[in-house]
DNA sequence: CCTTTGGTTCCATTATTTGAAACTTAGTCT
DNA sequence: AGACTAAGTTTCAAATAATGGAACCAAAGG
């Protein structure tokens, strides 16, 4: 039962080191890394050398610090274009943001966590990278619950075992059982709410993006504040949200059909 | 020399496989990969398993295809936040885009390549990852030349040795010597042009972002098309661009890149 | 000049990776 | 159906690469 160490094989460990570098907000020195590292000095050193040599990290010789490298950025660029729903969904979420006048989030599930891959705000100018790429908890966000509700039982349990169930607000569903009950309700309703479960004053209505065979591709949410609107008013948009999700799903599915050679 | 890198160690090979997947625009089947793979079936198979398990790839069981995984997107977010100039420069490039009414690029140099870390377009709504995160050649872009012109001789030569000198247009500087001459001119002028060297019809004026001691942090450019404006008109903005670069440098230095002594 | 701190290299031991071949499906042809 | 075939998966002894304690080096500090 994986308590923590899920670093299988050598590449797993190397990627672990990548995450360690990514974890720090600024360029890190070797010794900084060594402190929170499960690996001995020589081993960590060699990993850093290899990753740097491979372009996944970049080393500032003057300062002796490591940052994430270009190759990683290039891969990520490809990943975003290729594996995320974002490029396909872009026009649809723009429309949805314009129609509702609220902030729209597009998210996918990553190892039991919610990964926001795009965001559109009708009012404010668009934010870039600073928003896309963010991660959040699955158990207390609209998009997270919307996705969980339509995943297979094993996948849900795997995800649940990775949740922290931290009680962010009075409304946070802070146990697996409360969450499971909520997921059932969502499944039959077809869409999810966030009733200030993650942040006070923030509410949303979210729908999953599903393939024809019911596989979860991602989720879509319209977010607002209790100051500006109510859950009931957001629920009125649920049909629109679900239609938008369906359009994205259709587009995604047709676009992904392999037309080899 | 060594276009296809010597994949040192196990992680090198694994990353190689990642690149292979990234190379294809669409989801790839195992056998597609196997064809252009230097690795035997079993080996490739195990790499794909590991990478998938690590979230670097994602496997579509229905279709039996691999795509780049979302973990990369998360890493890229960290890379962007960490690559320091982008978050700092954001308000400044927004202003510059508004003032000039043209597209503004923010780039940094890594391993002889230009990495675009942000982009702002006054007219169109902002594009996300699809633009920021792109990598381009240094020898035939305004930002690339602006940075090279202020780098140390060794660094420049190292970068030159990594350029392909592909002749994109009639104006491309396609030899090291032409480039070196141009760099001298840029250094004394203080800013660089792109005279349709990379793409026909695309011109720009670029300035480096330098620390007090002259270290190159990045570069800034204002880009337009020959249809809309002229080089002379862009040059009129050069003072503004350089001022903007100076502001960013000052901010960066006080904030993230304290120059020692 | 001696010590500490931070980083790099060595190298015998150990564990992992390797890949030919055998095996398992899932299709296809006759 | 039965006999082929293509595509993906597993096995296992041999080959290879990773490991990490310890030695080493280079600055900075006393």
Image (cartoon, coloured by chain):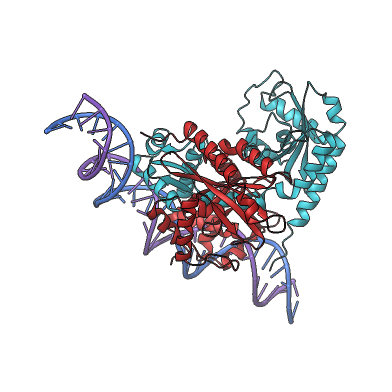
Chain colours: A cyan, B red, C blue, D purple
Residue C26 lies, in percent from the top left, at 70, 62
Say whether residue A246 is left or right of residue A215.
right
Residue plotted at (73% across, 23% down): A196
Q: Quadrant of the C terminus of chain A?
A: bottom right
The image shows residue A156, relative to residue B172, as above or below, that is above
Residue A53 lies, in percent from the top left, at 42, 53
Q: How many marks?
A: 0
Question: Can I make out residue A254 in this image?
Answer: yes
Residue A111 lies, in percent from the top left, at 61, 40
Image quadrant of residue B81? top right
Image quadrant of residue A130? top right
Question: Can I make out residue B59 in this image?
Answer: no
Q: Depth check: A52 or B67 in front?
A: A52
Say whether residue A49 is left or right of residue A94.
left
The image shows residue B260, relative to residue B38, as above or below, that is above
Residue A21 lies, in percent from the top left, at 47, 39
Residue plotted at (49% across, 49% down): A56
Q: Depth check: A216 or A202 in front?
A: A202
The residue sitting at the top extreme is A170
Q: Quadrant of the N terminus of chain A?
A: top right
Image quadrant of residue B75? top right
């Amino acid at each position: 039962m994986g308590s923590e160490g899920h670093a299988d094989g050598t590449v797993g460990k190397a990627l672990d080191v990548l995450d360690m570098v990514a974890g720090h907000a600024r360029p890190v020195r070797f010794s900084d890394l060594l402190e929170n590292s499960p690996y001995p000095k020589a081993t960590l050193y060699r990993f850093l050398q290899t990753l740097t040599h491979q372009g996944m990290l970049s080393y500032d010789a003057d300062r002796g610090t490591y940052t994430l490298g270009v190759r990683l950025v290039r891969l990520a660029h490809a990943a975003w274009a290729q594996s995320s729903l974002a490029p396909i969904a872009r026009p649809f979420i723009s429309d949805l943001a314009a129609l509702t006048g609220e902030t729209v989030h597009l998210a996918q599930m990553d190892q039991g966590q919610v990964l926001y891959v795009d965001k559109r705000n009708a009012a404010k100018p668009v934010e870039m990278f600073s928003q896309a790429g963010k991660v959040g908890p699955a158990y207390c966000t609209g998009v997270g619950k919307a996705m969980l509700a339509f995943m297979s039982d094993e996948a849900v349990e795997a995800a649940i075992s990775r949740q922290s169930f931290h009680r962010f607000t009075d409304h946070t569903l802070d146990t697996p059982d409360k969450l499971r009950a909520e997921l059932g309700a969502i499944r039959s309703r077809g869409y999810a709410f966030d009733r200030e479960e993650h942040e006070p004053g923030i509410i949303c209505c979210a729908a999953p993006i599903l393939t024809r065979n019911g596989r979860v591709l991602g989720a879509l949410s319209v977010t607002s504040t209790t100051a500006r609107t109510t859950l009931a008013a957001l629920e009125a948009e649920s049909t629109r949200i679900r239609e938008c999700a369906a359009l994205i799903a259709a587009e995604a599915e047709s676009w992904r059909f392999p037309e080899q050679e």
